[in-house]
Amino acid sequence: MAGKSQVSVAQCQSYSLHEVQKATKTCMDSLGGLDSYINPGDTVLLKPNLLQAKPPEEYITTHPVLVEAVINLVRDAGGMPQVGDSPGAFDRDIERYWKVTGLTEVCKRLDVELVNFETAGSYHKTRNGRDYHIAKPVLDADLLINLPKIKTHGLTVFTCAIKNLYGTVPGFTKVEYHKQAPKPSEFAARVVDIFAVNQPCLHIVDGVVGMEGSGPSAGDPRKLGMILAGTDGVALDSFITHTLGRNPLEVPTNSIAYEQGLGESDIKMINVIGEAPVVDNFKWPPKLSSTLEIIPGPLARGLMKFWWTRPAINPEKCNQCKRCQESCPTHALRKPGQLSEGQKLYIPEFDYDDCINCLCCMEMCPQKAVYHDKSLLYNVISRFSGSE
């Protein structure tokens, strides 16, 4: 039935608390009010995107003003808010993530608990024959409110409502899932599984300033001017990608979730309340899917060793922090063979035989030093096929 999935959108041009609070309340009022999802005394866990320990003005993480606005609305509805996430390459210093991203200040001022997913334990879940560990506070909460940020993603094309719930997996288990599912389609299926075991939940999207280009951390900020909300994360992600000028089904997490009946991806079947701003010429990340499909199979296999796109490190940007090395699930980033005696600082080198192109290195690089390197043949074929 048309309109069964609702997406509420309100325009929001700045991160002033007044404007974000008003836009968020407008979205929730359009969906029946937050008190229709919360009973007095309910524990409500807010799950922002804390990909890196970066300040809000770099637009890599969910803005703390949106977190504050939702905390206020939860309390107005009688709920007891908590805030928690597991960063992309957790390094035992979660307090640093909270402080740098602005959440420590907000939660201390409002007397809200910051929940450590890494020390809280996890529940074992199984879906599609695959095993997952989900942080206990997520599944113990009476309501999970997902607070994603609109960003591109080098591996999954797009990250928002569906992908943000990947952070409900504690610790380096997330990296292991990358290792087990190296292909983009395989990894997207894992992301959808984790999204599914966290349902139902409410999604409120930070779309005031998003990220385009080489997201989710190395891209460029892009003012989008909107807050969105809904209970159907697939519909939200599909509507947003459509608004940004892309067919929603070209995003693997959207298409897989839609095929599995987890939500609506047909724009005609989504009831949109409110009006999204017009976004022109949004920049998407480079395609990782093989353009060799246009070449006959035997020839393609022979050319494969000359056709590649893979991560590489720009030595002029690298500060030798080793975050790429620490986050690599296959240990494909290694110490160079030639080091002077006692040398501690070095730029890691790739062993491409072990690299699975998961782009964890790019995702976690604080200097944006990791980039897509492409072979000459890749560039020629991409131009010929129009895939870039």
Image (cartoon, rainbow, N blue to C red):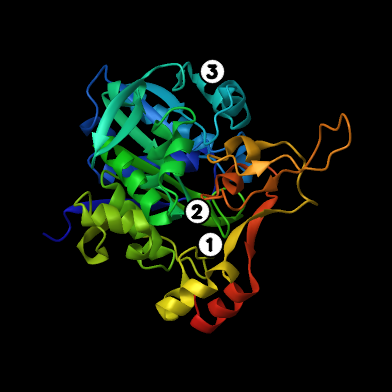
Q: Are marks 1 and 3 in contact (CB under 8 Å)?
A: no
Disc nearest the viewer among 3 and 2: 2
Q: Is residue 250 above or below residue 107?
A: below
**Which residue in the structure is indicated by mark 3?**
108
> In the rendered view, does 164 fall on the left or right side of 273?
right
Q: Are marks 2 and 1 in contact (CB under 8 Å)?
A: yes
**Which residue in the structure is indicated by mark 1?**
285
| Residue drawn where x is 76% and y is 46% of the image | 318
| Residue drawn where x is 26% and y is 59% of the image | 265
Q: Which mark is residue 153?
A: 2
Disc 1 crowd, CA 10 A, few/some/many (<14, 14-19, 20+): some
Q: Where is residue 288? Give x, y as percent.
A: 49, 63
**Tag 1, which secondary structure?**
loop
From this viewpoint, which residue is outermost toward the right?
341
Q: Choose between 244 and 16: the one closer to the eye.
A: 244
Q: Where is residue 2? Give x, y as percent.
A: 14, 61
Q: Where is residue 126? Give x, y as percent.
A: 25, 34
**Tag 2, which secondary structure?**
strand
Type of the residue with mark 3: Lys
Type of the residue with mark 2: His
How many numbered circles does the render carry? 3
